Amino acid sequence: MKYTFSKDFFWGAATSATQSEGRTTTDGKGENIWDYASKKFNDRFYEGVTTASTSRFYEDYQGDLDRLADLSFNSFRTSISWSRLIPEGVGQVNPEAVQFYHNVLDGLNKRGIKPFINLYHFDMPMKMQEIGGFENKAVIKAYCDYAKTCFDLFGDKVSYWFTFNEPMIPAEAGYLHDRHYPYIVDFKRAAQVLHHIVLAHCGAVKVFREGQYSGKIGIIMDVIPVYPRSQNPADLKAAEMADLFYTRSLNDAILKGHYPEKLKVILNQYDQMPEVSTDDLSLIAQTRIDILGINYYRPRRVKARDSLPNTNGVFSPEWFYDNYEMPGRRMNTSRGIEIYPNGLYDIAKKIQNEYGNIDWFVSENGIGIEGEEAFINNGIVEDDYRIKFLEEHLIALHQAIEEGSNCLGYHMWTFVDCWSWQNAFKNRYGFYRMDLHTGKKTIKKSGLWFKNVILNQGFSL
Ligand code: BGP
């Protein structure tokens, strides 16, 4: 069986500024929440590795761009670091950062690799966090000004812009689930942050449209498909609630222009409604994106709760469902998540049927494995598990495309092993292995396999 993708299909990989460039100290970069938290709350990070030790993209970008070209990528996503470009979050622009991003963009374009540029990948400048981060409306304004600065500076070199990566995460992980700084646990504040991120997204799109910049603008979202344990009404209800809180809340706002009515009712009932004005709602209603990126790693399986929630505790979407460990599920034990390739097909169908079949692409998909050195043979990581993972996900995607999904490309997470938000270098995701001691980057078997897929516009099985 041959799986062929269109000639202009986007093939590439994604990374982010904080995870690849890292904290550098002599070039005018301001601190962001990760630079701060990985030092101050060092024990929350695997082996205490901070943002100072990443994959050295800042120093080695020319080498990395050559590596991308070696893989025959035609596109590549990274993000601009807000705190590198504007160290205080507002005001003075850092000339060294301007030069650096020009060099990166020129280097990509020169190699025929389309830059997909994201403006925010979890990396709030510390100065902005000190005044409340996205809880404070002034930070929305600062973000929109930063977006305009990026469009003005780099607009003629970028054809695809993205306002945010996984906008749910800074709200959910930073204000409810204690995973990201500022480690606040308070649903209503998380909801306020999420709403303000939606407004920041809308504001940046507005700036982009008004400035008549060339290219397209979109957002990268994490749409975890929800599967109920069974067709029992209680399980179906649990799935509906998980979907409502974690997917439809954001997706409907971004893709349909309004929040789900049912969510408002529940939030009011539990006194968890954030401040939302009619002006906010009309801005959301007017905002449309050109392209959607979808990050997919795992499904979400749920069931009806086995016990009553502690209603004296913190309000949480988990009051309405339990996570379900399906017997027989395939696990990536390094990260503790299920592998379910068909989820990608289901996402594609959802976009096709519920969200107007908008142009989209897989903006992240990948498998992080602990202890990959065990698979090194003759100096190369023989990551057959990653090749299998890719094949299975691409087959699911191919089927959806055959059935009319407007999927324009596939980006893998990631091209060189990189630092991760809590796990630092525990799980490796790259097409290239990074030796943490020497900094040497060596292609893995999956990188060679992927290059062949690109050259052949697909693969046979
Ligand atoms: C995504 C993020 C990436 C990346 C990836 C892998 O959600 O957008 O930045 O980190 O997940 O996850 P992790 O690094 O937690 O293993």
Image (cartoon, rainbow, N blue to C red):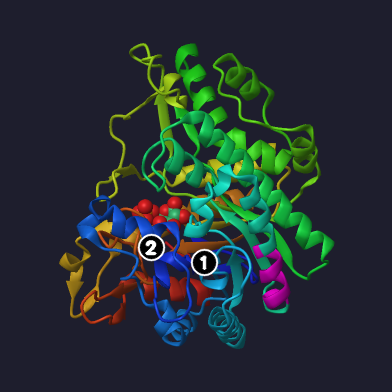
Circle 1: residue type? Ser
Q: Where is residue 210 shown, x and y percent of the image? A: 83, 61
Circle 2: residue type? Asp
Range shown magenta: 146-155
Q: Mark 2 highlights which residue?
A: 35
Q: Residues within 10 Å of mark 1 (few under 14, many from 20)?
A: many
1 or 2: tag closer to the N-terminus: 2
Q: Is any part of residue 70 visible from this angle? A: yes
Quarter of the image with the C terminus is: bottom left
93 shown above or below 265: below
Do the numbered discs 1 and 2 sit on residues whose CB atoms are within 8 Å? yes
Q: Where is residue 36 shown, x and y percent of the image? A: 37, 59
* Quadrant in the rendering for residue 235: top left
Q: Where is residue 160 shown, x and y percent of the image? A: 67, 67
Mark 1 → mark 2, Cα distance in angstroms:
10 Å
37 shown above or below 30: above
Residue found at x 16% / y 65%: 374
Q: Residues within 10 Å of mark 2 (few under 14, many from 20)?
A: many
Closer to us: 454 or 250: 250
Q: In the structure shown, which secondary structural element does the residue marked by tag 2 occupy? A: helix
Badge number at residue 273 = none
Badge number at residue 83 = 1
Residue found at x 25% / y 69%: 382
228 shown above or below 156: above
